[in-house]
Amino acid sequence: MATIEISCVEVWREVSNYLGGEISGELRERMQAHFEVCKHCTAVLDGMRNVVGLVGDGKLFQTPEGFNKRLYKKIVARR
Amino acid sequence: MSMPQAQPQLDSNEARLIRRVCDGETEAFEELVRPYERLVYVTAITVLRNQADAEEVAQEAILKAFSNLSSFRAESKFSTWLVQITYNEARMRLRKDRRDLYESLDNQQSDVDGDYWPRDFADWRAIPSELLEQNEARQALENAINSLSQMYREVVMLRDIQDVNIKDASTILGVSEGTVKTRLHRARLLLRDALAPGIDGRWCTSQSYQKVRPW
């Protein structure tokens, strides 16, 4: 069966859900077919995937030095 | 302290630790919250955008969880409950300390209807995660996140930084799962646009990159 085409605007609307695996198999196939031929949408997908990976890398917003020590001092005082 | 009754969401180790704390072995509380220290801190700093305030609120939230552990009903995961307390504390702090600012931010909290069009369609140059070993690069990315409005920072913080699932994020934020998804989508596109010139902005000066840009 032929894949039904999907527009760039529809792809942008769903690209985040695509990355999160939160779309139907049918929509995923249509989007994959679109990415194969549309370099603009592929650039949007690549960028979003990269950004999500960086943000989730675990290196951002580290607790300040001594955070743990100061916290447990307060917990001990509260007991 | 009496032990919470229903425990469908609790992992067995956490349930044991909570029981020990409720039975009076309060030292066990440290073991219970240690894995979530960063989670609590990130929640606070996402709302407050200030390291000192975030630390103070994170501490207050954890102490509040300690004092109220017996009222934890285990209808959600312990981490979700902890984040929810932190989130409420942080929002209260914002209200208390910066009423004017909070109100002006609050006015911008309505969801934007319509599609967001990405600003940049040039071939994406991957930013390697190794770059985040550098303080400047980390700071640039944190600044990009901080530049988002609060409702977008919150979903990025929960879903992408802390890997909280859509359902739990919806519970914590008190909005529908659809709203979480829409905000997350918009936030990710905004971040992508913010980082399109590279984490240090230098890609803009690259000849080869300029060539593929549509403007």
Image (spheres, coloured by chain):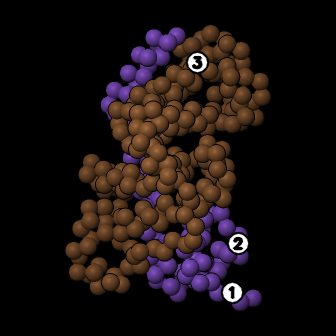
Asked whether the residues under the numbered discs 3 and 2 touch, taking CB atoms below 8 Å apart as contact, a structural biologist would say no
Q: Element type at marker 3? A: helix
| Crowding near the residue tagged with mark 3, few <14, some 14–19, many ≥20 C-alpha atoms within 10 Å | some
Q: Amino acid at mark 3?
A: Ser
Q: Element type at marker 2? A: helix
Q: Position of residue B142 (x, y in %)?
A: 36, 51
**Label number found at residue A25:** 2
Q: Nearer the viewer, mark 1 or mark 3?
A: 3
- Quarter of the image with the C terminus of chain B in it: bottom left
| Crowding near the residue tagged with mark 1, few <14, some 14–19, many ≥20 C-alpha atoms within 10 Å | few
Palette colour of chain A:
purple
Query: Height in image: A66 above or below B129?
Result: above
Q: Residue at x 55, y 35 (%)?
A: B88
Which residue matches tag 3?
Answer: B67
Is residue B41 visible in the rendered structure shown here? no
> Given the image, what chain letter belongs to the residue carrying mark 3?
B
The residue lying furthest to the bottom in this view is: A2
| Crowding near the residue tagged with mark 2, few <14, some 14–19, many ≥20 C-alpha atoms within 10 Å | few
Q: Amino acid at mark 1?
A: Ile
Q: CA distance from mark 3 to mark 2?
A: 47 Å
Q: Element type at marker 1? A: loop
Which residue matches tag 1?
Answer: A4
Judge by depth and name the residue closer to the eye, B34 or B140.
B140
> Given the image, what chain letter belongs to the residue carrying mark 1?
A
- Sequence-first tag of 2 and 1: 1
Q: CA distance from mark 2 to mark 1?
A: 13 Å
Task: Describe residue B193's horizontal placement relative to residue B36 as left or right.
Answer: left
Q: Nearer the viewer, mark 3 or mark 2?
A: 3
Q: Position of residue A68 (x, y in %)?
A: 40, 26
